[in-house]
Each structure stands twice: as structure tokens, then as C-alpha cells.
Amino acid sequence: MDGMSQCSWDAGPTSSASFGDIPGNLCSPTDDWPRPFRNLNHDDAWDHLAAASNLHSVKFDPTGRWRADALNFQPCAKTSSQDRYAVQQIHIQGRVWTLSAVFDGHLGSHTVEHVAHHMPIIVREHLELITQKHGDRVVPPPLIADMFAMAIRAFDDAIANDVLELFPGGLSSLSRLSDLQIQEVLDDQLSGGQNYTKARLCLYGTTALVALVDPDHQNLWLANLGDCQGLMVSETDQKAWNVEVLTRSHNGENPLEVQRVINEHPGEPECILDGRVLGAIAPFRCLGDTPFKQPPEFTRRILYNLYPGQHDTSPWEEFLMRNHTPPYISSTPEVTHYPLDPSPRAHRRYLILCSDGFTDICGTNQHVIVDRWARAAACSSSRELDEKSLALRLLWQALGNDPTSVSRVLTLNMDSPWLDDVSIVVQCL
């Protein structure tokens, strides 16, 4: 989703923003502050934020009690968001499961687009198999968790395997082929581009946070790869709200993840360098990013020949020289099961899935922001909730909860992004 063009700001006086006014960490004090922005009134700010957020809502039951609202936001007109989301119903043997997810792509959008489209399909296929095996019996939650993890791993394995299958004998056969022969296999764009498309997926990657809810709304499974975040927001008996973080980040800030990678690569002090895998990439678990999961020959012989002579390979060589015992990035998600109470008397509860762009703009105030959002939603009428996306309400709250703060982020006059991509899914449970 592209940000809105600057020429759309035809209302509101010009004001100035200081460095400290912009949330997140993409801006720099050296960016020639203060910088101008258009100060919109409340209704215009809300409408423009909605238009820039690629909104989507799904009702999972006729009453609207179970629903999900989603968005994808990047205000810079010259930058396309590399975040994606998915919100779908999955029909299995006459019963309806729900899947919601956020994906934070990196290096490019091809792989994240592929994952967002195909992940619900892959999960559905594995769900169909396991439910067929159990017949009329309920599948135990641990088996669903295992199925969930297996589906995601198999999906990721296929990204590289689909390319290796183009070369009979796999990697070992590449030594017998010239660069020109490899290029002839990969460059099939004049005949549909299937080989080219498969290989291109290996260049990029994405994190993934995927939620699955059973037809009876008694169980939630959450599968996490990377640094997206899952939050459970629950109403208490005292009419207060409890905000619980359900996920752990898989990056250099998580000492358990750091130690896992070190243990998997003994004698390789540069398997993690400057908090990054092989000194190059931040997430320790993700989909795609094949150069970190295959031997260097995969990248040098296949991916380099995808765009021969058209790019500088030196950044790749900086980490490929450290690639001795792949894989260094894991495609095994952390899958957690949570029992749910589906009764009408149960307290209100929201599941929030968000990319790290949301946690970035919230900073240390995330729990306060989410609590204020939940309190405001609780005071809203059913009609107001239907008319205004819960995800957009949450983004509005995170951006400052007033038209001036939102206007600054929407209309700041800069050529490069001042906010990370933000994806949010809010699911009523």
C-alpha cells in the first residue's frame, strides 16, 4: 500500500514539527528540523488516516461479536509498505476456523506478498488432513499446535526446494553448470516467468505472527517467527483492562535466541555479530531469507545469476564468508496455545497482532496506549464500533490521540520514511 501523495493535503494551515514530535526511531536529529506539516481538523485527520491505512474488517458471526479489523499504514508517499496482513475464515468439514496474521517483510515485498497470500491456504490444507484423520473426534490442542508449526516449516522449506528442483541433482549439480546455463534456467520471463518468480522469492524475507481460532472459540493458537508482537487485552471483574504480551521477539535483544544460535553453531564466533545473524540481518526466525539457510553456493550460483551483472554482490559476500553451517535463521515458529471462554457472560477480550512499527511508535507507553484504547472502545456504542475500525482507533491512539499529532505524522514534508511500516489486526475474542 502506497502512502497518500503530498498533493492531497489541500486543507489546514502549515505548522512546524520538531524532531521530538515524531514517534519512533526512523528520524534523525540531523534531518533539518523543524519541518513543515499540514495541521488538519479532526474529521479530515481521521478521514486521511483511514484512507492511508488499507483498512479491512471481517465479521465472523452475524451479530458482529466475533470480528477482526486490520490495517497497513505507511505515510511516506515515496515508500511502499513491506508489511502485510491476512484475516480469513477457513472452512473445514462444514465448520469455520478463523485465521489472522501480520507479516513484516524486509529487503523487498515479493516474499511477504507471497506468504500473506499462501499462508492461509497452507494452514487450511494441513487442518483438513488432521481433522480427516480424527473423523468425529476433536483434535487435541497439542496436535493442532504441532500441525501449525509443521505447516509453516513445510511452507518455508518449499521456497528453496522449488528452486533446487529446477536443477536435477540440487546444489551438487551446479558445479557442472556454467553461469550461462543457470541463467537460461532462471530467465523464463518470456514463457511465463515461473522459474524466475520462484528464485526471486529466495532473495527476500518476512517475519510472521499467525493466530488460529477453532470453530467453537474455545482455543487460540499463536505461531510466531520474528519480532511482530501479540497482545491479549482482557477486561477484569473491576472493569479495568489487563494487557498481556503473548510473544517473545526473535532477535538480538532476546538472550535466549542469541544463545540458541550460538549453541547451534559452536566454534563460530561470528554467527552473531553486532546483534545480527552473521552480522547482516536482525530477525533470528523468519520465512524466506534463503541465503542464511542454504550454503553459499546457493546464493553465488543461483541468486547472483538471477540478475547477472546488475547488482553489487559485496554486501552479500560480507556475510556469505561467515556462512559455514547453515541454516542460521530458523523457520520453526514458537506456537503457544491459549484456552478461551466463548460464553456470552465472558469478559470482553481482544487479540492484537502488530508489526514492530506499532511497538516502535508506542515506545515505552505501549501498555498505557492500549489501555486507553480499550477503555474508549468499552464506552462506545455498537454502532460506533461498526463505523470505526478498532485497528484504526488503536493507531490513532498511538499517534497521539489528537488531530495535530496525527496530522504531523500524516503530512510531514520529508522525502524518506519517518515512520516504520505499521500493520495491526484487532480480533474480538
Image: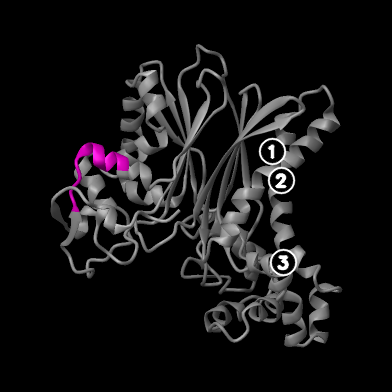
Where does residue 265 sit, x and y in percent of width and height? 65, 68
> Within 10 Å of the Cα at label 3, are there few (<14), some (14-19), or many (20+) other Cα atoms?
few
Asked whether 394 or 166 is in front, the reply is 166
Residue 317 in magenta stretch: no
Q: Which mark is residue 164?
A: none
- Would residue 277 be found to the left or right of residue 170 on screen? left
Q: Tell me which numbered mark, 3 or 1, is placed earlier along the sequence.
A: 1
Q: Is residue 113 above or below residue 396?
A: below
**Furthest residue in direction top, as rendered:** 345
Asked whether 364 or 107 is in front, the reply is 107
Question: At numbered mark 2, what does the secondary structure look like: helix, strand or loop?
Answer: helix
Q: Are marks 3 and 1 in contact (CB under 8 Å)?
A: no
Alpha carbon of mark 2 to alpha carbon of mark 3: how far?
24 Å
Q: Nearer the viewer, mark 1 or mark 2?
A: 2
> Within 10 Å of the Cα at label 2, are there few (<14), some (14-19), or many (20+) other Cα atoms?
some
Residue 45 in magenta stretch: yes
Q: Could you tell me which residue is drawn at 79 percent across and 81 percent down? A: 174
Q: Which mark is residue 192?
A: 3
Q: Tell me which numbered mark, 2 or 3, is placed earlier along the sequence.
A: 2
Residue that numbered label 2 is attached to: 122
Q: Quadrant of residue 336?
A: top right
Q: Is residue 365 visible?
A: no
Q: Amino acid at mark 1?
A: Ala
> Within 10 Å of the Cα at label 1, are there few (<14), some (14-19), or many (20+) other Cα atoms?
many
Q: Quadrant of residue 341?
A: top right
Q: Amino acid at mark 3?
A: Gly
Residue that numbered label 1 is attached to: 145
Coloured how? Answer: one colour
Q: Nearer the viewer, mark 2 or mark 3?
A: 3
